[in-house]
Amino acid sequence: MDKSSIEVFKENLLALNLSKKRLKYSYDICIKTGLKDNFSEEEFISFEAMTSRYARTTDILINKVLRSLDVLEFMDSGSIIDTVNNTEKRGITEANILRNLKDLRNSISHEYETENIVRFFEKVLEFTPILFSIIDKLNKYCELHINYI
């Protein structure tokens, strides 16, 4: 039996909020450490985890939650661009902001040299609070407009 669009959306939103919680844990550690030229092994592992969690959370937001929200609300979600534009129409965030988050996620996901991941640390520290804000606005939108949650 297939899951209903409501069930899929709820599962995706739950996964997003759990991913946000884990990203917040890593972010809090890394923001205290701050950026530097040389990281200890422990610091590097913390930043690497934060970067990976940022990419995963962004992916869940855009490719899972926002797409399943489009399905739930019977909106055209043919492409990621449509999904992003629908998010802007809902007043959750601007399309260009989501595009920037997604571009960073794609860059992180296509970096295969572990040592080169350092070049993303500053942007992840900058973009993570923006990602948190979008997730918070999405949750508020769902509380107000989706009476199945």
Image (tube, grey):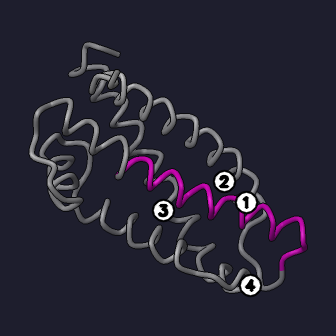
**Mark with earlier residue (4, 3):** 4
Look at the numbered discs 1 and 4 and tell me whether their residues touch, using CB distance below 8 Å.
Answer: no
Q: Which of pointers 4 and 3 indicates the residue nearer the eye?
A: 4
Residue under label 4, please give it: 115
Marker disc for residue 67: none
User: Label 1 is placed on what type of residue?
Assistant: Cys
Q: Is residue 23 left or right of residue 47?
A: left
Magenta part of the protein: which range? 39-62
Q: Which of pointers 1 and 4 indicates the residue nearer the eye?
A: 4
Q: Residues within 10 Å of mark 3 (few under 14, many from 20)?
A: some
Query: Can you give x and y, in whole percent of width and height, for residue 66 in the image?
Result: 29, 43
- Could you give the CA–CA distance between mark 4 and mark 3, rounded to whole angstroms? 21 Å
Residue under label 3, please give it: 127
Q: Quadrant of residue 111?
A: bottom right
Q: Is residue 74 left or right of residue 130?
A: left
Q: Secondary structure at mark 3?
A: helix
Q: Secondary structure at mark 1?
A: helix
Q: Residues within 10 Å of mark 1 (few under 14, many from 20)?
A: many
Residue under label 1, please give it: 30
- Could you give the CA–CA distance between mark 4 and mark 2, rounded to whole angstroms? 19 Å
Residue under label 2, please give it: 27
